[in-house]
Image (spheres, rainbow, N blue to C red):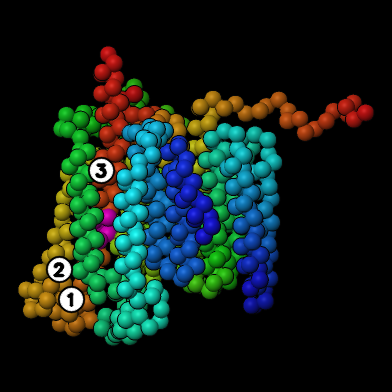
Amino acid sequence: MTIYAITAIAVLVSIALALARAIIGPTSYDRILSVNAIGTKTVLLIGVMGFLGGRPDFLDLALVYALVNFIGTLAVLKYFKFGTLRGTLSKPRDNA
Amino acid sequence: MLLLIAGTMTVLMVRNLFVATMLLGIVSFTMALIFISLDAVDVAFTEAAVGAGISTVLYIGTLALVGSQEKERAKFAVGPLVICVAVGAVLYYATYDMPQFGHPDNPVQTHVAPRYIQESPTEIGIPNMVTSVLASYRGYDTFGEVTVIFTAGIGVLLILRQRRRRRTDANKDAKDTPLDTDRDGKGSSLSGLGSNHDLVPHVIAKLLIPFIFVFALYVQFHGDFGPGGGFQAGVIFAAGIILYALVFSLDLARAVINEKAILFLICAVVLLYGGVGVAGMLLGGNFLDYNVLASDPVAGQHLGILLVELGVGITVTAAMLAIFYAFVGRADLIEEASQRGEK
Amino acid sequence: MELVLDIATWILLLAGSVLLVITGYGLLRLPDLYTRIHAGGMADTLATTLIFIGLALQSGFSLITVKLLLVIVFIFFTSPTSSYALAQASFVAGLKPKLDGFGAVKKPDEDA
């Protein structure tokens, strides 16, 4: 169906715009934001491409990539804040 | 494809290792997209899970240890370059004797592949042919892979394992403070780990982690019928525990699964895999022959593949967790050592 | 019945695509990090929900619909949490939101 192709093109355009923000963005938090947004849009792209190609088996892959995106963003944020991955999200370690 | 080449060249050239880590994530995701366009879903699955996910988290754990600027390169060395070029040329020359890559008349395409494709439904009887090739026809190779992962996990645990006094400190922290009172003794509905700023990630993590584990089990056992299998399931399971360790602290995650348990798991599953092979020998067949494991050969194949995939999944989980614990736990030691050195 | 489902799918997918393009454009044009977090985190979730519901209508009652719903629920929970963590991290790091006008609205006496 052609609507799948239209949606896929819209997702690609959106990814390109987010990539532009990743390159321009003055602070690093802008870049982390756009990487997270590209991850979410990629999940969308995998789903739509699966339907476009007639193989909806890709949805497992979409779920895994959503999980991976979430964990990656949290890890990067934690590293940015503290320089270590050890503690919780707002304290570097338990006995701090 | 161009994005892949451009991304990889940029990884080689940037100096800031953090940017290199992000780019590696993007490169591995582009590889997964190429695999999808080549219609290889299992491989894309593994590439996306391992390359874009766990590798990024482990690299960031490493960056916490080594800092994020690359050291200055030494002078341009001619000797190693000559050796690399010479070995590469010899290898390239050696490929002239091999059949042309991808040619339809290759022995692989005319003898091996058709036999797998034709015989697999009758001999093994599971719909996903990738799993049947991986776990049964090439079970010996998969045993080798499991041994490699086992060696990597053991190596990391040997070299980077923390000493006993660290562990008693961590145990004291985790046990003496009951998990539902604050550090000042005030009661609070969540564990007294962080300020209230942590409430949203705590709640979301507690909601999602059981579903991540169930999804990992689904991928593990559905690998016979669709994309999935042991490697991907192991990575997803490890990702769930790493999520727990990121949102709550590493010490709490250590209280849930400590290093002894990981060591036990890694050794136990290699024994499981080898045990399946030896059981095949004891029951009258060859090593890793699944036909003799049950009264009906096809059922024997199913049982053998189930056990072997389970073994692969647990090994991958334990190895990933061992590496994560070792890297992230060590950052603390280095920092405390430097603090003590300054005092 | 097929026609109704097809029309519904078309509407949902078109709405989702338009929302995605607007989100991307907003990510470029919004003036401050905190406003961009809204574009990047929240609107993406809505677009994903719309598009995946449209795809689910196409596959009827099958395992695929269940998986699509699972992805929707997962993204629904995790994308706003990442935005929250990002906003909190940047606020604690000291990035102040721009609260004193954004310069896009001209006062009437500047048009001369």
| Residue B54 image position (x, y, % from top left) | 37, 49
Q: Amino acid at mark 3?
A: Val
Image quadrant where residue B183 sits = top left
Whether marks 3 and 1 lie on the same chain: yes
Spatial CA distance of label 3 from label 1 is 36 Å
| B314 magenta-colored | yes
Give the left or right position of residue A47, taking residue B55 as reference: right
For residue A64, the mark is: none
State the residue position of label 1: B290
Q: Which residues are magenta?
A: B312-316
State the residue position of label 3: B256
Dot 2 and dot 1 residues touching (CB under 8 Å): yes
| Residue B320 image position (x, y, % from top left) | 29, 49
Q: Amino acid at mark 1?
A: Tyr
For residue B276, the mark is: 2
| Residue B336 image position (x, y, % from top left) | 28, 24
| Residue at the farthest right position | C112
What's the chain of the residue with tag 1?
B
Q: Amino acid at mark 2?
A: Val
Dot 3 and dot 1 residues touching (CB under 8 Å): no
